[in-house]
Image (cartoon, coloured by chain):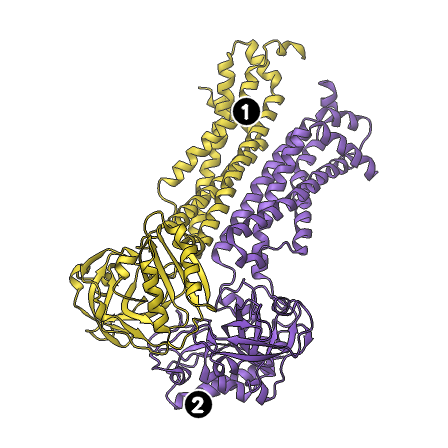
């Protein structure tokens, strides 16, 4: 039966092709605009590490100015100081922990004079970083967490997959050497590759939300201590609330925050214990005259932290509301057009009813017809979504490219939404059409 | 008047009318709020930075390979300034509109616990005002002898500074900015005296709420990756950009020239989000109006087709084509009017919600009536075709079927 109805629907749609085109266009445009914007919102708000997001906690300590909070109303700063990083790392009270910070360096290949040096994004982190964030390796491994290597006694690096492609044409480069140079201080040092990552680009880049977190992740990972000992140029945000004095030593002993600190805590007990440890640590520090503000430490899991940092921009939420209203208008439009279509068929319906077709089977037939329109609209909408994302990519530039990808979930959702909206929009007109009194219709012929 | 019968006829056949009215209400809601957003984004992306952007570009020399960067920087600057077509050039620690830079809390020296204003710090020499073509509205420029080298790990600030008018207004709200020359302020903890006031020089952070607060200090930054800001003679910029890049690369092999951008390009990149948002909303707005217009057209032509016989009867009873035309125009007017009234309420409610939820602009008082008029006109335009079609119905139609 369904094939018969499909054929009927095709005939009927072809007969009024102008109207059909208009309906498919209305649904398609509605879905296209709505889905492009929903996709961006979805990718912004998506859980970047669903398996572990409730076990990874971001640490905030309130070492700020006694007179004003780091952020109103009473938020602690979003990074921690070098001193606190040292203390927390050496206490190692969490199951896993890592501080991390970003830097830049000029990359050269010591054995290849023809290689064009380039400026790379560096991330300094500890050994736990890789297992904590489920970072996939293509070749080799990260460094081990024994204190000696983790603090950067060895000059080792882990490359991202793209960087390995660029430097070594994608081959297993474990054991090869590159140099990392400071862009401002004319130094450069030899590093040995010990690992190459597989494709890894969490969106948003949750482990560091302090700078553009929709751009690509770091290109090279090095043991945290090397950022300072090798004099690389730090590139993340640094915030200070009181003057630091001159020189690196003064900076490290200052209240300036520049390090992001993550812990992995497997259950509530571990979380409670760690919170107690943080409070105890800060209370001890207060005795030494630091931490002038009342106790205000925070542990936020990944999703809480994304939320706290407003990863979904308010503008994006406004666009989403606009997109939904746009879809509503398109659907109202479709309802109107379907209404006019089915009411135009009154006489046909009258004849069918008089010949014994039940309301149910008419209803079924016309729903098949609207579903076909919905499918057409869905396909068009998908095409328009893709076009919309491509043109937004052209507008916003490659920095946002991670947000402008059509995700498989979204493809399925778009087609499903289109069919559901078309059927939803078709229900009332179908119902109206099927209520037509056959006797009256036949009489007026 | 005919409104009575038209209205009663509408009530007997509500569905189509309600559909159109609700559609118009949503359209008005989106269009009005999109319009204020577009207006705000476009004006934000277009606000002046205080410098002559049209003729200016910048570049950064990375990893200059020398024992003493001061020599290279001075040689670079001399060579750039002597290049024919260059009006003037400057080494800066950061570039306006580039979204990266240095800031310091600035406050007045007297009083206890005076408010602290965050200001951008520009390290410049005595050529800054000429290179950027800033307007010095009071006081004097730096003397060449004021300019000193700043070491990479130095943290204090020099004692003679030029600040922007907006910062002077914040620091000394009771005095006119021109009279604040010579006053004592604190940059972080470093005491300094204001020696000049410039009309405008924006801080580099385009999203900052204190974008007009900037301080210029007479310092040259000793760094291995100096940034140069270069102003060309009018019309020479595009020729000079590759020329000076090549010239710098030539003068010292092994260095890397990065960030060669005209100020127009810097502005475009920094306001990417704003212009992009405006473009998306503009597109949504236009398509929405188009779809609503088409929807009205579709439903109006349906209602004409269903009433062919009635129209024929009216014509046979003596109604002129103008009467028929007027009937459909007035009917449409009634529908769209109720739609725009509902839409005005929804638009304002949505606007209030947005204003409360984020830093969203309010709809101007004239926006609502303007939007209402536009949509009513759109409705009349869309119904015009079907109404003309209705006029073509001949009075004889009435007699064909009974």
Residue at label 2? Answer: A284
Expressed as whole percent of the image width and height from the top left, the position of residue B285 reads 49, 41
Residue at x 72% of width, y 27% of height: A15
Above or below for A80 versus B6: below
- Quarter that holds the N terminus of chain A: top right
Judge the density around disc 2: few (<14), some (14-19), many (≥20) Cα neighbours within 10 Å: few
User: Observer-nearest residue: A40 or A114?
Assistant: A114
Expressed as whole percent of the image width and height from the top left, the position of residue A201 reads 61, 66
User: Observer-nearest residue: B196 or B213?
Assistant: B196
Tell whether label 2 touches label 1 (CB within 8 Å). no
Label 2 element class = helix
Camera-side mark, 1 or 2? 2
Give the color of chain A as drawn.
purple
- Quarter that holds the C terminus of chain A: top right
Residue at x 27% of width, y 68% of height: B217
Give the color of chain B as drawn.
yellow
Judge the density around disc 1: few (<14), some (14-19), many (≥20) Cα neighbours within 10 Å: few
Residue at label 1? Answer: B9
């Amino acid at each position: 039966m369904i094939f018969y109805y499909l054929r009927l629907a095709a005939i009927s749609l072809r007969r009024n092709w102008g109207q059909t085109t208009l309906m498919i266009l209305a649904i398609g445009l509605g879905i296209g605009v709505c889905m492009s914007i929903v996709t961006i919102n979805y990718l912004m708000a998506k859980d970047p590490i669903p398996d572990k997001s409730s076990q990874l906690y971001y640490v905030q300590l309130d070492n700020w100015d006694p007179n004003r909070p780091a952020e109103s109303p009473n938020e602690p700063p979003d990074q921690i100081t070098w001193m606190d990083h040292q203390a927390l790392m050496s206490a190692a009270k969490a199951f896993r922990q890592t501080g991390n910070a970003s830097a830049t360096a000029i990359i050269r290949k010591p054995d290849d004079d023809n290689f064009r040096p380039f400026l790379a994004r560096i991330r300094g982190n500890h050994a736990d970083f890789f297992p904590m964030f489920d970072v996939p390796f293509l070749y080799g491994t990260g460094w081990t967490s024994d204190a000696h290597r983790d603090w950067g006694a060895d000059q080792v690096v882990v490359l991202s997959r793209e960087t390995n492609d660029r430097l070594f044409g994608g081959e297993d480069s474990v054991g090869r050497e590159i140099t990392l140079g400071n862009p401002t201080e004319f130094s450069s040092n030899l590093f040995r590759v010990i690992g190459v990552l597989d494709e890894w680009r969490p969106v948003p880049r949750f482990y560091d939300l302090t700078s553009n977190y929709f751009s690509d992740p770091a290109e090279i990972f090095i043991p945290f201590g090397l950022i300072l000992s090798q004099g690389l140029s730090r590139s993340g945000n640094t915030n200070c609330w009181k003057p630091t004095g001159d020189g690196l030593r003064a900076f490290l002993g200052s209240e300036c925050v520049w390090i992001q600190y993550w812990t992995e805590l497997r259950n509530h007990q571990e979380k409670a214990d760690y919170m107690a440890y943080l409070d105890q640590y800060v209370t001890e520090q207060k005795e030494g005259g630091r931490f002038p503000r009342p106790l205000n430490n925070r542990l936020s899991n990944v999703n809480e932290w994304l939320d706290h940092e407003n990863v979904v921009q308010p503008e994006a939420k406004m666009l989403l509301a606009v997109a939904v209203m746009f879809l509503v208008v398109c659907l109202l439009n479709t309802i109107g057009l379907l209404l006019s279509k089915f009411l135009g068929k009154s006489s046909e319906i009258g004849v069918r009813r008089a010949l014994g077709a039940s309301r149910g089977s008419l209803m079924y037939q016309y729903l098949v017809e609207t579903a076909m329109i919905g499918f057409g609209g869905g396909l068009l909408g998908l095409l328009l979504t893709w076009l919309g994302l491509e043109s937004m990519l052209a507008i916003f530039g490659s920095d946002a490219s991670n947000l402008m990808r059509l995700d498989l979930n979204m493809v399925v959702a778009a087609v499903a939404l289109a069919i559901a909206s078309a059927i939803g929009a078709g229900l009332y007109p179908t119902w109206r059409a099927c209520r037509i009194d056959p006797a009256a219709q036949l009489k007026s012929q | 008047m005919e409104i009575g019968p038209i209205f009663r006829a509408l009530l007997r056949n509500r569905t189509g009318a309600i559909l159109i009215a609700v559609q118009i209400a949503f359209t008005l809601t989106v269009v009005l709020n999109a319009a204020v957003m577009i207006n705000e984004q476009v004006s934000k992306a277009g606000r002046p930075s205080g410098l002559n952007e049209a003729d200016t570009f910048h570049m950064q020399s990375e990893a200059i390979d020398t024992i003493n960067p001061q020599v290279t920087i001075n040689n670079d600057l001399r060579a750039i300034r002597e290049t024919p077509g260059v009006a003037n050039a400057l080494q800066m620690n950061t570039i306006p509109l580039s979204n990266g830079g240095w800031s310091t809390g600035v406050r007045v020296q007297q009083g206890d616990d005076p408010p602290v204003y965050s200001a951008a710090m520009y390290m410049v020499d005595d050529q800054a005002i000429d290179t950027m073509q800033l307007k010095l509205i009071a006081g004097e420029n730096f003397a060449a002898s004021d300019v000193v080298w700043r070491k990479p790990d130095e943290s204090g600030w020099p004692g003679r500074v030029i600040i922007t008018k907006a910062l002077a207004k914040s620091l000394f709200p009771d005095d006119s900015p021109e009279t604040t020359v010579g006053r004592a302020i604190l940059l972080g903890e470093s005491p300094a005296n204001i020696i000049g006031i410039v009309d405008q020089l924006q801080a580099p952070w385009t999203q900052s709420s204190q974008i007009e607060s900037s301080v210029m200090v007479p310092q040259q930054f000793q760094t291995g990756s100096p940034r140069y800001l270069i102003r060309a003679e009018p019309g020479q910029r595009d020729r000079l950009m590759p020329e000076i890049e090549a010239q710098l690369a030539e003068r010292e092999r092994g260095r890397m020239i990065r960030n060669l951008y005209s100020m127009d390009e810097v502005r475009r990149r920094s306001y990417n989000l704003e212009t992009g948002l405006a473009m998306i909303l503009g597109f949504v707005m236009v398509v929405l109006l188009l779809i609503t217009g088409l929807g009205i057209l579709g439903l109006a032509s349906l209602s004409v087709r269903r009433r062919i016989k009635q129209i024929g009867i009216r014509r046979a009873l003596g109604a002129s084509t103008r009467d028929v035309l007027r009937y459909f125009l007035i009917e449409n007017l009634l529908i769209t009017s109720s739609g725009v009234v509902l839409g005005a309420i929804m638009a304002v409610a949505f606007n209030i919600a947005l204003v409360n939820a984020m830093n969203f602009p309010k709809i101007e008082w004239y926006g609502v009536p303007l939007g209402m008029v536009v949509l009513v006109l759109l409705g009349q335009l869309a119904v015009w075709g079907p109404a003309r079609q209705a006029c073509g119905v001949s009075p004889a139609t009435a007699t064909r079927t009974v």
